[in-house]
Image: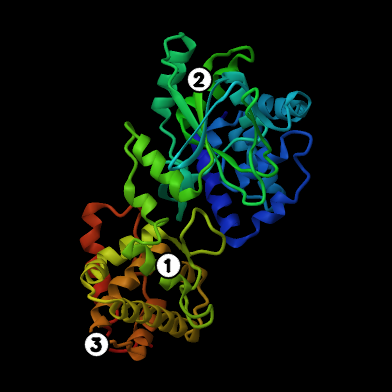
Amino acid sequence: MKQERKILEEDIYVILTELNETGNIKELLDSELLNEYMELATVTKILNMNLPLNILLPEDLFHITRLINSYKKRINVEEYFTDEEITKAMENKNNLKLISNPRIILKNTIYSRNKFGENWLCKVTYQEIYQWIKSGKLGYNMATQRRGVSRRIRGKIVTMPYVNEKSTIEIKIAMKNNEFYSNMIGFNVTPDFDHRLDYDKTDGTLTIDPTIFETAVIDGWHRISAIISLIDEDKNFDGELYLKVTNMNIQKAQLAIRQQAKTNRIDDEYFEKFDPDNKTTKFIMDINELLTEKTNFLYSKIDIGVNTPNTLLTFELFKEGLDLADYLTDIDNAENESELKLMEKFIVKFITEFYSVAKENKITNENKNKILIDPTFIMGLLIASHKYYKDNEVDREAMDRFIKKFKNNDTKYTFEYPIKVKDRQKMINKFKNLLEVRESVK
């Protein structure tokens, strides 16, 4: 490739995040452009960001770029790919359809059951794993994986799968030299309440139909990435790994991988958003669901899942905004449910009123409008609102004065993400007195 591959991958992640947020990703999902070149299931997982880009060959990356450009040209392929890579990509047609079984079939499994549910243990080959990934039968689900990475790229905050390239390379070298200890990887099959997994107790065969069940790697992505890279280089390379298959819902899967993690420690806060009994989680979910879209600016705008369409900021960013504003302390100290409800309603009222005033001022500058809905600006509004919470005060006139000033100055109101330690106090200071504008700017 002409440029570092990581630069292109970041561009693609930014575009896919935007398209998933707006729902326009459907235009690409419905396209038949790549039918001759890639498996539909694989393309779908990539577009929905359920398959990290690190496992793609350069020619696959070229096709994904080509597909994105078919909707709207955003990437200059000539800047990234050599003529040889482009020619190879266009000449190589997909042959996985001819050699891949439509189902995942695991033989000689050992069945067991515990408090988490059903489990199957068996051995699988590198070649089988390669086929399942490349044909889209096996994917990556950030809701049941280690914490994704949130970064600001090209001005957009993007949540992408965490891949430690150094670990992948080290594992790859060990496998290639036959020095890798064959420890266990894990897949989770998300339950479907209308179907049961097909398990033959007589011969121990477990059959998974990908058209019914979503199967995702729950533990071992770096090992699988190394396997994909090795077989891309040598089609005959093979080996064996032990595999544990579980059939758990998201909550149980998260609990299981927290307990299994011994290296690359999982951040428990990442899984907090899936715990409905957690006080902060319930608070944020209530705000996300309070009233209606017309009366709550934040209605369904907080991404409780991962890359949910039509959202403005993630659960983690909103929680960090509550923390910077000191609302988390108030939530912890709340003596009863009614106190929390009053707090939720005030935040919704304050922020909804702010954007109503902004709309009345008819801001025509596109960059100014982008600033107002930047995730770090919304975090800042939480800081600004806390000053008025105790008095339950929403001052429209003060908001109007700020918006008029905002329209006519170049003060920076957004921050890089993740928020650096040195910037936290700067952010608090900037937004704490955001509405203390003494007179309107004309």
Q: Is residue 75 visible?
A: no
Q: Is residue 97 visible?
A: yes
Q: Which is nearer the N-term, disc 2 or disc 3?
A: 2
Image depth: mark 1 or mark 3 in front: 1
Q: Is residue 327 left or right of residue 167?
A: left
Which structural element holds mark 3?
loop
Report the quarter where the C terminus lies. Answer: bottom left
Q: How is the image coloured?
A: rainbow
State the image quarter where residue 416 is shown.
bottom left
Give the CA separation, mark 2 to mark 3.
Answer: 61 Å
> What residue appears at the point 45 percent right and 24 percent down from the top-left corner?
184
Amino acid type for the residue under numbered disc 1 = Met
Report the quarter where the N terminus lies. Answer: top right
Tag 1: Cα neighbours inside 10 Å, few (<14), some, or many (≥20)? some
Residue 205 in picture, x, y percent from top left: 64, 26
Residue indicated by mark 3: 391
Amino acid type for the residue under numbered disc 2 = Leu
Q: Is residue 231 left or right of residue 115?
A: right
Give the CA separation, mark 1 to mark 2.
Answer: 40 Å
State the image quarter where residue 174 is shown.
top left
Image depth: mark 2 or mark 3 in front: 2
Residue indicated by mark 2: 241
State the image quarter where residue 374 is shown.
bottom left
Q: Are marks 1 and 3 in contact (CB under 8 Å)?
A: no
Q: Which is nearer the N-term, disc 1 or disc 3?
A: 1
Give the CA separation, mark 1 to mark 3.
Answer: 24 Å
Residue 359 in picture, x, y percent from top left: 49, 82
Residue indicated by mark 1: 285
